[in-house]
Image: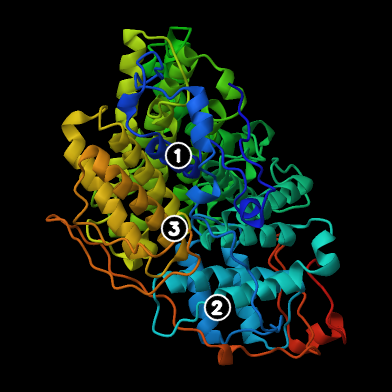
Amino acid sequence: MDDHAEEDFNRSERAQATGFMGQSSEISWMQRLQREADQGSTQQHDDHFNGPDGLHAVPESDINDVYKDTSTTSASYHLDDLGVSISEAVEPYAIPPRETADKLFNAYLVSVHPSFPIIGKAVFTSQYNLFYDQPSAMPGHKWLAILNMIFAIAAKYSLLIQAGGGVDDRDHLIYFTRAKALSMNGDAFFSHPDLQRVQVEGLVAFYFLATGQINRSWKFSGISVRSAFALGLNLRSGTADTSDISKEIRYRVWWSLYTLEHLLSTMTGRPASIDDGVCTAPFPIPFEEENFHDENVSQLLNLHSFRDRRVRSTISRLSNISTRTSTSLPASSTSGPAANHDQAQEQVETDWLRTITPNASLYFLYFVDLTSIMQEVIRSLYTARAIHTAWVDTEHLIARLSSKTEAWRSRLPEAYDVTIRKGSATFQRQRLNLAFLYYSTKITLTRPCLCRLDRQAAHTRKLKKFTHDTAALCVSSACHMLDLIPDEPDAIGLSNMAPWWCVLHYLMQSTTVLLLELTFRARHMPDDAKTISNAMKKAIRWLHHMSQENSASHRAWMLCDGFVRRLATDIGLDVSDLPMHPRQQNPTVIQTPTMTTTSYPEPNATPWEVPHQNHLEPLASSFFVPVPYGEVMHPAICTDYDEYLLYTTATEETTNYFTPTFPDMDQT
C-alpha cells in the first residue's frame, strides 16, 4: 500500500495547526493505539491477517472504518493551536537590566548552547558585554533579535525550573515579540539571507520547539536551512577571505541546524530538508572556542586533510569497523605489511578521540554523529520509498543500522557512556542528552517490528524470530529510556539536567511503545509483563507531575491516561495507583488547570546526582528599560564571525563610525 494522507489537513484551523504527522512520529503511534482500542481485542481477528511480527493484523477495510473515528489532532499533545502573540504593545528596543540579562544569557549558555551552538560563544559574549558596558554602543536590528531570542528561550527555561517566585509566564513571549518586530516584520522578512538572519530563524525554530509549537518549529527550521543553503553553509569553505576560526563557527551554525531539522523530522514524520549527500561541511572539531588558538587545535582548523582524517573519517570508521565485524566481512581485501601498516594507522586514528578531555564540543561531535544515524534510520524505514522495500531487505537494514548504532555507543568516552547509571556529575547533562537520543534511535529503528499494521510478510520461522526479537528490543529500549530518570517525579530536576526542549517527545516515544506492547498483552516479553506495566505507570506519573506547569505535558498525560484506563479493563490492569483522571475535562484542553499533585516513588527511587541549579530570577515588566530611538550603535556588534573587531575610544568611534540615525549595521 502506498503512503498517503487519510485526512484533509485543510479542513479546520485545528487540523492546519497540527498538520500531517508521518509514521516516525509518536503522534502517529498514538493514533494507532486509538485505533487498536476502538477495534477491541486482538483476539477478534483471523490468523491469516498476520504482520511481520506474527501478531494478528486488522483487515484494511476495518482500518479505514476505524480511522473515521480518529484524527491526528485527537492524538496530538502539541500546542500549535495556541497563539504566539500578546495583546499589549511591546517596545522592540527595550532591554532587561544587566542583572536579569546576565542570568538569562548564562542560563542559555549552560542549558542550550552545548547542544545548539548556533552563535559563536566567545565573540557573541564579547559583543554582549560591550552592549551593556557601553550604553552608547547600539547594535543592528538582527543582532538585537538574536539577543531577544536567546532571552526568550532562557525565559521559557526559567519557567520550567521555577527559578524564583513570581516568574511571569508571558516573559518569553515578550522577548519573542521583540525579536519578531526587529527582524520578521515588514520588508525585513523578505530580505535576502545573511548569517545573522540564519541565526535568528534557527533560534525561532528552537524557541517554537521549546514551547511545544512543533508545526511552527518545523516550518521555521526549513526556512533557516534554506537560508543556510543560500549562503553555502552546508559546504566546506575554501575561501582565503574568511579566517579559520570564522569558518569553524559557521560549520557549527550549520550542524546546529542539521540536528534541529532532523529532530523535527523525526517528531513530525515529515521529510527533512537536508540529505547527507548535500553536506560537505566538516564535522565540528572536538575542542572549545577558547582553545582555538592552541597549536594542535590550530592545525586541525588550518589543514583540511588532517582535520578530515582525524574527525570525519574517524567517526565514520568507528561505525564501519563494527558493521564489518557484525556481518563477518573481511576488514581488508589485501594482506601483508602494507595492509598491517594501514590497520595500525587506522587504530591510531580510531583511538584519537579517546585521548581528548571531555568537553562540550566533543559532546556535540558525538551528538551530530548520532543524529546522522537517526537520519539514516528515518530515510531507510519511514519514507514513502521505504514502504516498497521487501521485508527481508528491511530486516537487513535494521540489522545494519543497529550495528552502526551500537558502534557509536561502544566508542563513547567513559564520561559520556550512556549505559552508566551514575557517572560524573560534571557531564551528566551532556550524557543524558546523548542517552535520550541513543534510546530514541533504537526505538525508532526497531518500532516497525512492534506494530502489527505497518507491513505484512511471509510466515517463516526465521522472519518471525527476527521480528519478535527486534520488537522485544524496542520495548526494552523504551524501558531503558525511562530508567534514565528517577522513579520519583521531579520536573525541575528533569528540566535542569535533560534536554528540556524535547524531553516530552522522548517520554511520549517510550510511553507509546509500552502501551503498544501492553495492547499486545506483552507477547514479545511475557516474562517482563510486570516490569513493562510498572515502567508505563512510572511514565504516566511523570507526565501527570509535569502537567502541573506545562500545557503540552498536560495534554500528553490526558491522552495516555485516557488510553490506559480504556486498556485496563481489557487486559486486567490495575490502575488504582495512578493519579485520578479529571473526567470532566477534555483531553485537548488548552489551559493547564491548577491541580494538587501526589508523588508516587518506587522503593528504589534515585534522585538526581547534582543539585538543582536555578540560574534565573523572576522577571517583571518594570525591569524592561527602553532604549531611546536617538541612540547610535556600535559597528563592532555584529555576528558575521569574520574577526574580532577592535573597540577603540568613544571619541574615535564617534568620529569614524557613528551616524545621527538608528541604521542597520549588521555587516561591517
Instruction: Give x and y (percent) for residue 74.
Output: 50, 50
Residue displayed at 64% across by 77% down: 86
- Tell me the quarter of the picture where residue 403 sits: top left
Is the residue 238 above or below the residue 292 in the image? above
Secondary structure beneath label 2 = loop
Residue 503: mark in rendering? none
Q: Earlier in the sequence, mark 1 or mark 3?
A: 1
Residue displayed at 44% across by 49% down: 363
Please give the count of numbered marks on the rendered protein.
3
Instruction: Measure the C-alpha gap from mark 1 to mark 2.
Output: 33 Å
Residue displayed at 48% across by 55% down: 77
Is the residue 88 above or below the residue 490 in the image? below
Foreground mark, 2 or 3, reads 3
Q: Earlier in the sequence, mark 2 or mark 3?
A: 2
The residue to which callout 2 is attached is 170
Residue 587: mark in rendering? 3
The residue to which callout 1 is attached is 29
Instruction: Measure the C-alpha gap from mark 2 to mark 3.
Output: 24 Å
Q: Nearer the viewer, residue 39 or 56?
A: 39
Badge 2 vs badge 3, beta-carbon distance below 8 Å: no
Dot 3, how many residues are within 10 Å of its Cα: few (below 14), some (14-19), or many (20+)?
A: many
Dot 1, how many residues are within 10 Å of its Cα: few (below 14), some (14-19), or many (20+)?
A: many
Q: Amino acid at mark 2?
A: Arg
